[in-house]
Image (cartoon, rainbow, N blue to C red):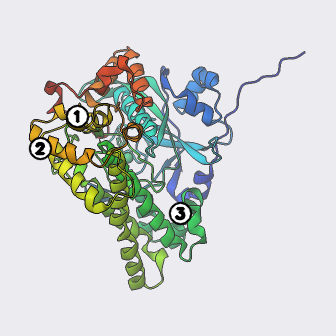
Amino acid sequence: MDRVSTAPTVTLGDRFAREFPEMALAWQAEQAPAPRLLVLNDRLAAELGLDVAWLRGAEGLRLLVGEHVPDGATPVAQVYSGHQFGHYAPRLGDGRALLLGEVTHADGEPRDLHLKGSGRTPFSRGGDGLAAVGPMLREHVVSEAMHALGIPTTRSLAVVATGRPVRRETVLPGAVLARVARSHLRVGSFQYARATDDVDLLRRLADHAIARHHPHAARAERPYLALFEAVVAAQAALVARWMLVGFVHGVMNTDNMTISGETIDYGPCAFMEAFDPATVYSSIDHGGRYAYGNQPRVAEWNLARLAEALLPLFADDEEQAIALAVEALGTFRGRYDDSWSAGMRAKLGLPDDLDHAVSGPLVEELLTLLQDNRVDHTSFYHRLGAAGGGTGSPARELFLDLAAIDGWLTRWQALEPDAAAMGRVNPVYIPRNHLVEEALDAATEGDPRPLERLLDAVSAPYDERPELDRYAEPAPDAFGAAYQTYCGT
Ligand code: AMP
Ligand code: MG
């Protein structure tokens, strides 16, 4: 019998490219001289219906760097605007990225398959269009850790070394990240559509966002206002989750805030160690605009920019449109506070219906103690839930002011916290900065093992494993203070 070729075909939709030609420029990735797979997310590949063995092969690698374009696919660079550190940039767009197309996830919902580091595009401005191995692996590790923590995020399907050198402060090996997202619609996408003065484009983009992310809005009395409210709710819940795990995004520009409510763009991000609202890791964030403690305020500010962009869709009368926008944006703080407070009660093992008059002051006092004693955020909650409890708690050793923490522990213990429930919400393992750096440096030098071990730890963050003790420890003192992360790397 003749052998039938069973080479798998990947079907990529081109819906965005077709429906939004004004915002999608057909483009090709740059050639990768020597593609080499650094990491593949087998489970995600399977969820997307992709053949893992084929992806690992020569043609699969060519897909993952953008050289193999399946029949019917139209890779595009997307255009968007954005406020960067508060300053409006009218035309940003994918300067080193391409949307390959849409795939269907096993959950029945579409996902974007997108490349980052795939070469220059007409939106590159002064940039080289490239990405280095280290930063792309950082996005892989941190986004997979966020996913394992149950926090909405874009995913990483793979990182492929290109064999092309990238010039930064030194010459580094280049890589392409294959990113999977519910979409790449950003606040900045709507800012761009609004700035064209083409209200029809703005409306089509909003309809697309409703259909793709917030379908219930279509049935509301005012669908576009309901879309805005849904984004407000999704972002309030998202940023509360960041705050509860100590995640510092680092570059919350409006082009880095999604309409879907997924975390996107892992550039200068980091997990905070010692609890301090002023924590900043990004090398360029001199004013602390995107400091840990500012993140809820910044999210609200970004959502105000989204409201401005959507204004013509809210009502014909501008004053009425503004009043509706202000009212909807006004729900952000309450939503954020509710999500965060519920999350804090869960972290402390307290019942959700506990009187706020009891839990509120207890939480406030704790945050002051954590900050004054420079206590490691992740270790504290983990140890608090560990056996012992009360003034015998292993969390106690993290404080210098023992009298103060003992007083707090006694009051907390009197509320009969549920230790088992705490273990389900307080991670043991987060991608700690010193471990991320160690893993990226080793991988860049050709040793994948530290990265594999780190991925193993953070992929099951609540599952304590004695052999991974080192992954639960804060950075050595010498590492912590001067740690910096970078944009556009
Ligand atoms: P980001 O800070 O990663 O959100 O990037 C902001 C903008 O700069 C986006 O338009 C990116 O496409 C663009 N960009 C970042 N790095 C590069 C690069 N190396 N080459 C070209 N464009 C870049
Ligand atoms: Mg970005």
Picture coordinates of residue 462 (x, y %)? 41, 33
Q: Residues within 10 Å of mark 3 (few under 14, many from 20)?
A: many
As helix, strand or loop, the secondary structure at mark 3 comes to helix
Question: Which callout, 3 or 1, points to the residue nearer the camera?
Answer: 1
Q: List the residue tagged with mark 3.
A: 205
Q: Residue at x 33, y 24 (%)?
A: 440
Q: Amino acid at mark 1?
A: Ala
The answer to whether the residue bearing label 3 lies less than 8 angstroms from the nearest atom of ligand 1 is no
Q: Earlier in the sequence, mark 3 or mark 1?
A: 3
Q: Is residue 56 left or right of residue 96?
A: right
The answer to whether the residue bearing label 1 lies less than 8 angstroms from the nearest atom of ligand 1 is no
Picture coordinates of residue 308 (x, y %)? 38, 70
Q: Residues within 10 Å of mark 2 (few under 14, many from 20)?
A: some
Residue in the foreground of this view, choosing between 326 and 430: 430
Residue in the foreground of this view, choosing between 76 and 298: 298
Q: Earlier in the sequence, mark 3 or mark 2?
A: 3
Tell me where residue 211 sits by quadrant.
bottom right
The N terminus lies in quadrant: top right
Q: List the residue tagged with mark 1.
A: 395
Report whether residue 90 is seen: no
Q: Is residue 187 left or right of residue 42?
A: left
Q: Residues within 10 Å of mark 1 (few under 14, many from 20)?
A: many
Q: Which mark is residue 404?
A: 2
Residue 298 sits above or below residue 448 on the image: below
